[in-house]
Each structure stands twice: as structure tokens, then as C-alpha cells.
Image (tube, rainbow, N blue to C red):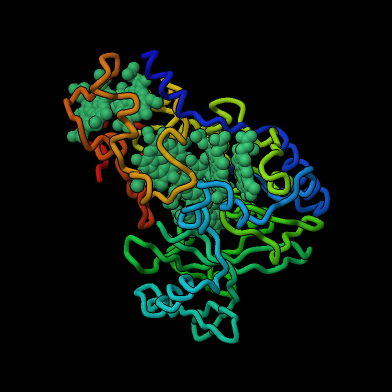
């Protein structure tokens, strides 16, 4: 057992992050609260870094193209889900998918389509003889699971609201269906025909988990300067001084101090265990598979070792380049070569993930890997 702990510990990364970011974020958050005055944040369902503009940092933002000159971590990073999780709607892949909306089943049933004229991308939908149109400008999701498009529009305070388009593209069906969380039947009026409107605080939250830099002026997101995607400096902090000093300058404030801090770096977006209602945390709830830190923290593996997310994931590589369904992930601690390790009581030496960490179907046509590693009942959902 001791050996397992140490093994887990070695895997636990040296990255140390600190309170500075949080303080900067909270500070920016409170400024935002003050600036918009009456429009305080809605009580958060879960807390996230509300703002990602670290203008207050002593360090500034570097051009991320520079990282590859000195770091192998940047070599395949552009193929990761993180790097591509937010792109302009005008991105070529995004346009190609949008063109297929009209011919899809839901597109035909709901008379929905997308028109592109002079670089403007308009969602179009007819209800009761009235044609509604709205411009869409961003595409959320790399497409590994799904892509959802949004349009941004200023509210009466000048802050940015968001229209989330009603039709999402799913990889599993290579087609469109209704966006998760939206009503099964479309509504009437300009907004309800085309999707759902989110107020500025909620729009802000969407971008803060899908972008690296979210510059804000007077509490308003400057869309022109968003750095989309979860890229190097979202996790490692602004690096201008680091690049200028050719690596000699380190900002220790960005490093994590212990294991939970390291997990929470990821869980800031993937959801911290304490953000989940305790009543929701039980093996029969398929929805918690969407929130990997919540499930993982329930596992005997996690509780009894020094495991973190990077024990099994290299955040610098695409899943396809890291044998993401590998037995190696388990054998780090359940190795038949080591007498002290606990081995599979069913006598299996292969295929660990499909029995102990299966992909769980969600209500929408996507599946997530259940990170609550455990011995499963036969009645439980299997791939
Ligand atoms: C999703 C968060 C995330 C992103 C995005 C990310 N990293 Fe990392 N990076 C980490 C974590 C966590 C570690 C510690 C790894 C471990 O635990 O072994 C790390 C480690 C590193 C290290 C090694 C540090 C050391 O002391 O060994 C370098 C260098 C690095 N990252 C550079 C980059 C570059 C360059 C990019 C962009 C191409 C990038 N990272 C993107 C999370 C991230
Ligand atoms: C000119 C070379 C150079 C460039 C460009 C560069 N780095 Fe580094 N970086 C280094 C060196 C050298 C080290 C190791 C220094 C040490 O171990 O003392 C380092 C260490 C790191 C580390 C681990 C230690 C720490 O400071 O946290 C991270 C993370 C990192 N770099 C991220 C980045 C990112 C992100 C970029 C792009 C924005 C980048 N670096 C650009 C040279 C560079
Ligand atoms: C700023 C928010 C944010 C942070 C911080 C973050 N993630 Fe993510 N992560 C995302 C989003 C958004 C996606 C969805 C990517 C997509 O659209 O496919 C994602 C996807 C992933 C995936 C699937 C990758 C793929 O290529 O399909 C893994 C694995 C992952 N994250 C692990 C981590 C780990 C490990 C950390 C911490 C080191 C971390 N994430 C930190 C937001 C974040
Ligand atoms: C708390 C952080 C957070 C917020 C807020 C957030 N997302 Fe995400 N989003 C994620 C993470 C993490 C993933 C990756 C899920 C996974 O693969 O496990 C993701 C995935 C996605 C995906 C890809 C499909 C999927 O399920 O993997 C889409 C599309 C998406 N988000 C759109 C949005 C939109 C639109 C909003 C605002 C209405 C939003 N997100 C708000 C963190 C967030
Ligand atoms: C014991 C190994 C292990 C650990 C630890 C682990 N993961 Fe995973 N993770 C996996 C496997 C296996 C997959 C499925 C890979 C695939 O489908 O290619 C996966 C998939 C994912 C995905 C893709 C979406 C999904 O659910 O299929 C995300 C996001 C993710 N992990 C995030 C995390 C985060 C965040 C942590 C830390 C809280 C973490 N993982 C810790 C093994 C692990
Ligand atoms: C960092 C070390 C570590 C890793 C990696 C790891 N485990 Fe574990 N696992 C443990 C420890 C420690 C226990 C507690 C039992 C023990 O003392 O051996 C455990 C317990 C288990 C149990 C029993 C759960 C229960 O509720 O009784 C199963 C099943 C399991 N692991 C499967 C896996 C699989 C499958 C993987 C790979 C996806 C994996 N583990 C990866 C350390 C780890
Ligand atoms: C066909 C499904 C299946 C596969 C594949 C599988 N397991 Fe298991 N595993 C089980 C079942 C069922 C049990 C509970 C058996 C019992 O208690 O009699 C179990 C139990 C365990 C336990 C708990 C042991 C204990 O003494 O509490 C560990 C650890 C474990 N498996 C690890 C692994 C690892 C590592 C792999 C891959 C090398 C793996 N399993 C592959 C079905 C599987």
C-alpha cells in the first residue's frame, strides 16, 4: 500500500498554483459586480473563475506561438479538445456543420437553417409563418462530443447577453438535435424560436470556462480580444515576463500547493466535488459522470493514494496520442509484478477501463467516462 501511495505521488505534478489568481479573479469579479451595480451575479449553481482577465498581474500575456520554441508540451497541443473548445462561428469546420442543419431531421421538423451572407452567419427559423433571424458568432465545443453555437448581443446595460442556439451538433449521430437544457418544443418570438437567452453573468461564465483570456472593460467582455480555448496560459498564467526572460522568470503564484489544489485546477471548470449537491452523489445518477472530479473523489483509488488528474491524463496531448483507454493507467498501482498491489478480484489482467470506468450515456446523445472507479453491479449501465 505504501508503495502505491508513493507511486501516485510521483505522478503528482510539480505545478503549483496559488491564491493570487483567485484573488485577482475575485477582485475582477467584485469590480464587475460594482460596475453593473443592480445586476449582481445570479447565485452561482457552481462557482467558476468569473473573470479570466488578469490585467492586474505583474506578468502580461505572451504570444502562445512562442511556447513551442522551448517546450515540447506545445508540439501537439493544438489538437487537444482544450485548444479547440471555442472557435469563431466562421471557422471552416463550424461552417461546414452548420450547412447541414437545414437537411437534418430536427432542422426539417422545425424549419431551421443557417444562412451565410457577407460573412454574417444567421440562424433562421420559421414558426407560424413568421421568420426569425439572429446572428451567431461563436461555436462552443471542439466537436469531440458536440458543438453548440451562440450569438452575443448587448443588453440594455451594454453588457453581453448570449443567445444559445436551439440546435446542437452531436458527433455520436453526426447530426443535429435540441441543445441540452432547452425545451423539447420550440417556443414563439424572436428568442424562443431560435434558442435560449442567457443574461450577462451567465454568458460570462460560459466564456470563462471555454476561453483563456476574457478581457473586460467596465464589466463588459470585449469580444474582439477574447483568446478562445483553454490554452497554455489559462493553466500556467500570463507568461510575458517568462518568455522575455527566456524561461528564467517564474511566477510561483501559478503553482499548485498540494494534491487537492492540483485537482481543483482542473475542477475549476470540470466541477469541484463540493459543488455537487451531496444528494446527487450516488452510483445511480448518470449525470455525475459529466463531472469527473466529483466521481473520482468518491473512488477508493483516489481516497487511498495520491492520485490526481494527471496520473492518467497529459493535458498537453490529444487523447488519441496518449493511449487514453490504457491499462497502463491502472497498472501504475494495480501491477501484478508487485506483490503488495491489490489485483483484480475477478482475475482480469486486461480491459480494466471497460468494466471499472465505463462510458455512461447521458440524456443528450453524448457519453462520459465514469470516474467513480469501483466494482460495478451487473444492473448498472455498461457500454
Ligand atoms: C489544462 C491545463 C493545462 C494546459 C492547457 C497546459 N498545461 Fe502545462 N501543465 C499542466 C499541469 C497540471 C502540469 C503538471 C504536470 C504533471 O502533473 O505532471 C503541467 C506541466 C507543464 C510543464 C512542465 C513543468 C515542470 O516543471 O515539469 C511545462 C513546461 C508546461 N506544462 C508547458 C505548457 C505549455 C507550453 C502549454 C501550452 C502548449 C501548456 N503547458 C498547457 C496543465 C496545463
Ligand atoms: C525562450 C525559451 C522559453 C519560452 C519561449 C517559454 N519558456 Fe517556459 N520555460 C523555459 C525554461 C528554460 C524553463 C525551465 C526553467 C527552470 O526549470 O528553471 C521553463 C519552464 C516553464 C514552466 C515550468 C515552470 C514554471 O515556470 O511554472 C512552465 C509551466 C512554462 N515554462 C510555460 C511556458 C509557456 C506557457 C510558454 C509560452 C507562453 C513558455 N513557457 C515559453 C523556457 C521558455
Ligand atoms: C478553463 C477551464 C478548464 C480547465 C482549467 C481544465 N479543463 Fe479540461 N476541459 C475543459 C473544456 C471546456 C473541455 C471540453 C473540450 C472540448 O470542447 O472538447 C475540456 C476537456 C477535457 C478533456 C477531454 C479532452 C479531449 O481532447 O477530448 C480532458 C481529458 C480534460 N479536459 C482534462 C483536464 C485536466 C486534467 C485539467 C487540469 C490539469 C483540465 N482539464 C483543466 C475546460 C477546462
Ligand atoms: C464551469 C465551467 C463551464 C461553464 C460555465 C460552461 N462550460 Fe461548457 N464545458 C465545460 C467542460 C469542463 C466541458 C467538457 C465536458 C467533458 O468533456 O467532460 C464542456 C463542454 C462543452 C461543450 C461540448 C459538449 C460536451 O458536453 O462535451 C459545449 C458545446 C459547451 N460546453 C458549451 C457551453 C455553453 C454554451 C455554455 C454556457 C451556456 C457552457 N458550456 C458553460 C465547462 C463549462
Ligand atoms: C485512473 C485514471 C484516470 C484519472 C485519475 C482521471 N481520468 Fe479522466 N479519463 C480516464 C479515462 C480512461 C477516460 C476515457 C478516455 C477515452 O475515452 O479516450 C477519461 C476521460 C476523461 C475526459 C473526457 C470526457 C469523458 O468523460 O469521457 C475528461 C474531461 C476527463 N477524463 C477529465 C478528468 C479529470 C478532470 C480528472 C481529475 C479529476 C481525471 N479525468 C482523472 C481516466 C482517468
Ligand atoms: C494512484 C494509484 C491508483 C491508480 C492509478 C488506480 N488505482 Fe485502483 N485503487 C488504488 C488503491 C490504493 C485502492 C484501494 C484498495 C487497495 O488498498 O488496494 C484502489 C482500489 C480499486 C478498486 C476497488 C474499489 C472498491 O470500491 O473497492 C478497483 C475496482 C480499482 N481500484 C480499479 C482501478 C482501475 C480500473 C484503475 C485504472 C482505471 C485504477 N484502479 C487505478 C490505487 C489506484
Ligand atoms: C470483465 C470485467 C472486469 C475487467 C475487465 C476487470 N475487472 Fe477488476 N473486477 C471485476 C469484478 C466483477 C470485481 C469484483 C470481484 C469480486 O469481488 O469477486 C473486480 C474487482 C477488482 C478490484 C478490487 C479487488 C479487491 O480485492 O477488492 C480491483 C483493484 C480491480 N478489479 C482492478 C482491475 C484492473 C486493474 C483491471 C485491468 C487489469 C480489471 N480490474 C479488469 C471486473 C473486472
Question: Could you tell me if residue 47 is visible in this image?
Answer: no
Q: Which of the pair 306/359 is nearer the observer?
A: 306
Which residue sits at x=41%, y=22%? 7
Q: Is residue 9 above or below residue 139?
A: above
Q: Position of residue 124 (x, y in %)?
A: 52, 80
Q: Position of residue 130 (x, y in %)?
A: 54, 84
Q: Residue 211 lies in what quarter of the image?
A: bottom right
Q: Position of residue 60 (x, y in %)?
A: 75, 49
Q: Is residue 157 left or right of residue 326?
A: right
Q: Is residue 128 left or right of residue 358?
A: right
Q: Is residue 52 left or right of residue 14?
A: right
Q: Position of residue 182 (x, y in %)?
A: 49, 61
In the picture, the quarter occupied by the N terminus is top left
Residue ranking furthest to the left? 347
Which residue sits at x=46%, y=35%? 309
Q: Is residue 303 left or right of residue 250?
A: left
Question: Could you tell me if residue 76 is visible in this image?
Answer: yes
Which residue sits at x=69%, y=53%? 62
Amino acid at each position: 500500500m505504501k508503495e502505491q501511495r508513493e507511486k501516485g505521488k510521483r505522478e503528482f505534478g510539480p505545478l503549483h498554483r496559488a491564491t493570487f489568481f483567485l484573488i485577482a479573479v475575485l477582485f475582477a469579479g467584485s469590480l464587475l459586480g460594482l460596475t453593473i451595480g443592480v445586476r449582481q451575479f445570479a447565485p452561482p449553481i457552481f462557482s467558476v473563475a468569473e473573470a479570466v482577465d488578469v490585467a492586474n498581474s505583474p506578468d502580461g500575456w505572451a504570444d502562445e506561438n512562442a511556447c513551442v520554441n522551448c517546450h515540447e508540451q506545445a508540439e501537439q497541443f493544438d489538437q487537444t479538445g482544450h485548444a479547440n473548445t471555442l472557435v469563431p462561428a466562421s471557422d471552416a469546420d463550424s461552417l461546414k456543420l452548420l450547412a447541414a442543419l437545414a437537411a437534418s431531421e430536427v432542422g426539417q421538423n422545425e424549419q431551421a437553417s443557417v444562412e451565410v451572407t457577407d460573412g454574417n452567419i444567421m440562424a433562421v427559423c420559421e414558426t407560424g409563418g413568421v421568420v426569425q433571424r439572429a446572428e451567431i458568432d461563436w461555436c462552443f465545443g471542439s466537436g469531440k462530443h458536440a458543438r453548440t453555437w451562440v450569438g452575443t448581443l448587448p443588453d440594455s446595460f451594454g453588457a453581453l447577453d448570449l443567445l444559445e442556439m436551439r440546435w446542437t451538433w452531436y458527433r455520436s449521430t453526426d447530426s443535429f438535435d435540441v441543445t441540452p437544457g432547452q425545451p423539447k418544443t420550440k417556443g414563439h418570438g424572436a428568442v424562443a424560436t431560435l434558442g435560449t437567452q442567457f443574461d450577462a453573468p451567465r454568458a460570462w461564465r460560459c466564456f470563462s470556462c471555454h476561453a483563456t483570456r476574457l478581457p473586460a472593460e467596465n464589466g463588459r467582455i470585449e469580444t474582439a480580444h477574447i483568446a478562445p480555448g483553454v490554452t497554455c496560459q489559462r493553466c500556467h498564467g500570463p507568461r510575458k515576463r517568462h518568455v522575455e526572460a527566456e524561461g528564467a522568470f517564474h511566477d510561483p503564484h501559478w503553482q499548485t500547493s498540494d494534491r487537492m489544489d492540483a485537482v481543483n485546477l482542473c475542477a475549476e471548470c470540470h466541477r469541484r466535488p463540493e459543488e455537487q449537491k451531496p444528494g446527487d452523489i450516488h452510483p445511480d445518477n448518470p449525470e455525475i459522470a459529466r463531472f469527473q472530479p466529483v466521481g473520482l473523489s468518491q473512488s477508493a483509488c483516489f481516497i487511498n493514494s495520491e492520485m490526481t488528474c494527471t496520473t492518467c491524463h497529459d493535458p498537453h496531448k490529444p487523447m488519441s496520442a496518449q493511449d487514453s483507454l490504457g491499462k497502463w493507467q491502472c497498472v501504475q498501482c494495480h501491477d501484478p509484478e508487485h506483490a503488495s498491489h491489490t489485483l483484480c478480484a475477478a482475475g482480469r489482467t486486461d480491459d480494466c477501463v471497460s468494466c471499472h470506468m465505463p462510458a455512461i450515456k447521458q440524456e443528450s446523445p453524448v457519453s462520459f467516462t465514469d470516474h467513480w472507479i469501483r466494482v460495478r453491479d451487473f444492473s448498472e449501465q455498461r457500454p
